[in-house]
Amino acid sequence: MDTLFPQSLELSIESPRQQAGPFAVVALEQAIDHVLDYSIPKKLMSQIQVGQRVRVPLGRGNKLASGYVVQIRATTAHAKIKPLHDLVDDRVLVSPKLMNLARWMGRYYVAPLGVVLESVIPLAVKKRIGLGYSSIVRWAIERQSLQSFFEKTKAPKRRAILSRLLQLQPDEGIDLVRLAGEADVSPGTVRKLAQLGIITIVEQPDLQGLTDEVLSTADAEPEKTLNAEQQSVFDQIKPRIISSGFSVNLLHGVTGSGKTEIYLQCIRQVVESGRQAIVLVPEIALTPQTVRRFIARFKRVAILHSGLTSTERHRYWQRIAQGQADVIVGARSAVFAPVPNLGMIVVDEEHEPSYKQDTAPRYHGRDVAIKRAQLENVPILLGSATPSLETWWRVTKAPASSIPLPPSPGTPGEGRGEGDLDRRTTIGRQDPPHPTVPELKADRDRGPERQNNYHLLTLANRVRGLQMPHVELLDMRQENKFRRGVHLLSQRLEHLLRTTIESGHQAILLLNRRGYSNFVYCASCGDALQCKYCDATMTYHRTPGTEVKTARLAAGIHTGQLNCHYCLASNPLPDKCPECGKKLSLFGLGTQRVEEELSRKFPDLKFARVDSDSMRSSKDYEALLGRFASGEIQVMLGTQMIAKGLDYPNVTLVGVISGDTALALPDFRAAERTFQLITQVAGRAGRGDAPGRVVVQTFMPDDPTIRFALKHDYIGFSTTELAQRKSVGLPPFSRLVRIILRDQDQEKLHRLCDDLAAAVTAAVAEVGPGVSVKGPMPCAISRIAGYYRNQLVMMSPSGEKLQLVLAHVRKARALARSDRIAVDVDPTSLL
């Protein structure tokens, strides 16, 4: 055996006497970190299938709990087996390939399989909201066998049913109620034939009468001609799309280089071959222009995102499952779309942190998309002007044997499918889903040669010969020396903004911090107002609807309240310092404060503030973008919501109010996030015939990150940043697992930390050298919403070793307190 997988992890306990089945292996929807075996009653024997929802008795009181059948097997080693109670849903909600994907997610992201399946299947689908279903009856045997059974049957009611069924064509179905009515029998009599295996009864959605609003378009967009650079990229990837083998293709293109057109033409190849494509976008409500381009280009497009109603979500999900959508565009969870014949996956802006889910299962949408592409044996296209350093390193630098994310699944369709659980023994009734040694070894070793699967595609120039915008750097330290008072806009930016508007063009101003002031401070006693429930300062927000020109009443009292951006607590702003009674000062900046300054300095300017406070829904955002596109709004001021996915030819000026806002954060990705944000928002300028200009205001003009962003130099930034990461062993040169523990009682938290630390230490000793453990230690924000927070961080160059350590810890039940312990594999933030 490979030395990376020690013999000590093999389960070699002699199995008890096997019981005859069949048995259903059920993953409960509760956060129980194991699956359970249940016997199948005779009345359900012919109905139970993998992927269905069932109800089962649980615990001493046999309280009914819902779960998913993840396997059916002939024998079990468990002594006491309870019978399955009933079938909640006749539909098979989870296909075999999605079940394999869910199994991998449960193992890799350390989450109960039932919790993973809850993420895969929308609640609206489970509850059948807004859509009716019919029970469709079809033959389960050949016509000749059915005729023979009819001739041997003496019962009049059965003969009536069989006589009607013999009138059907082999693939034709008939509604159960209609069949019972025409045969003059009860539906129960028809169902008895299903128990004999003569017929099948399948729940089928009633899609008749539904409109095709998202599956068609009135304004079709003609296909565009690619320029020479785009055509070269398309010619490189086209053979991989046609052959439909697994490959990871990174499309690194500067902003405005036409990446979306490459997506569209690749998907055209897929659709014309009769297959479907999934397109992931970071936040679908924030990229309406991109979505509209897909709808305008293809006849059948389905949209999946959190802004849909339950009825819409259910209907679109069913249309996708029925093969009635060629292209599925959606946010993170659209990676689970039940497409019957997947041909390609596209991940737009693959670097975006919003692809990472912050609740269990804490998966990364991009990496799950890569895994699904491997399982389906189809190509995946990742696009970005500023790729994540992990993706860039994997594609350009890493040898095949050291590519860290995600583990290879083996040949398409392989994995822990039906029957795999039979090949290992278990203890008691619990069937722990933590990865076994053979599974981890298979994750690493099986599958196509990885060195041939990663490809870099480059678009170095903007379309139509457009030039990248000119970027200016303004040192706000020097600016403040010569101006009295507080000015968030420099004189240079004010001048350029004025001339831009006078020339009939538009501008975008970025400040990635909402509110009015993020620091309320008493200069007398030195106290800052903190949240009562968090170890963080509160942010002052002006009251919505008050006069934009000022945040004060006539009496000089501020109109607004203090908000905590972590626990969402809200308090009124006190008139005086609670400690000493002296006057409070408002420090820091936010979009509301910039809005106030714009209103004061440019009284006739037509502008709008775009942040999560002002945009309550995706409809608000789309309406505002429509006004901006028509020229009704001259300037958009906002947070990162306006930094991506926008293409307006009339925008010639972009101003970054504070380019160093995120650089001081205690996170090793701070420089990467800063570079990405500045580069992305700068790319909004100069997309039309008029040249673009970008002004970056900063108090750190010599910082290398900002200097690289000014030159649009991703290669230089990535080279420098990767060298620094390598010198200290940070990702992508190592793998991280962050375990966060929380409790309202600090003593209980310390005991919980000690127990987990002991289990992790024992697991690391068992696995061997190569895994370092830091902590337990307080988190950067040590208390949120009344819960004290500690963390334990594991780091290793070997992803397999980290998975083995987690498997040991999981087996020891040290992670069972899911309400107090959160495991984050490959974290995107350490705050």
Image (cartoon, helix red, strand yellow):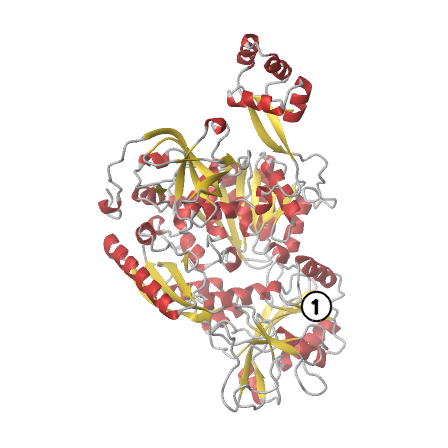
Labels in figure, total: 1
Q: Tag 1: Cα neighbours inside 10 Å, few (<14), some, or many (≥20)? A: many
Q: Which residue is mark 1?
A: 506
User: Callout 1, which amino acid?
Assistant: Gln
Image: 262 above or below 543: above
Residue 475 appearing in the image: no
Left or right of 116? Residue 446 is left
**In which quarter of the view is residue 543 placed?**
bottom right
Q: Residue at x 37, y 66 (%)?
A: 749
Q: Position of residue 137 (x, y in %)?
A: 60, 24
Q: Is residue 4 above or below residue 824?
A: above
In the depicted view, which residue is nearer to us: 190 or 684?
A: 190
Figure quadrant of the C terminus: bottom left
Position of the N terminus, as image quadrant, is top left
Given residues 771 and 713, the one toward you in this image is 771
Relative to 757, residue 116 above or below: above
- Secondary structure found at label 1: strand
> Left or right of 109: which side holds 315?
right
The residue closer to the viewer here, 362 or 789, is 789
Residue appearing at x 66%, y 62% in the figure: 616
- Residue at the far front in the pictured view: 61
Residue 263 pos. (x, y %) = 58, 47
Q: How far across and down, in percent of the image, does residue 339 sit?
A: 56, 39
Residue placed most toward the observer, 240 or 442: 442
**Residue 738, image x, y percentages:** 39, 60
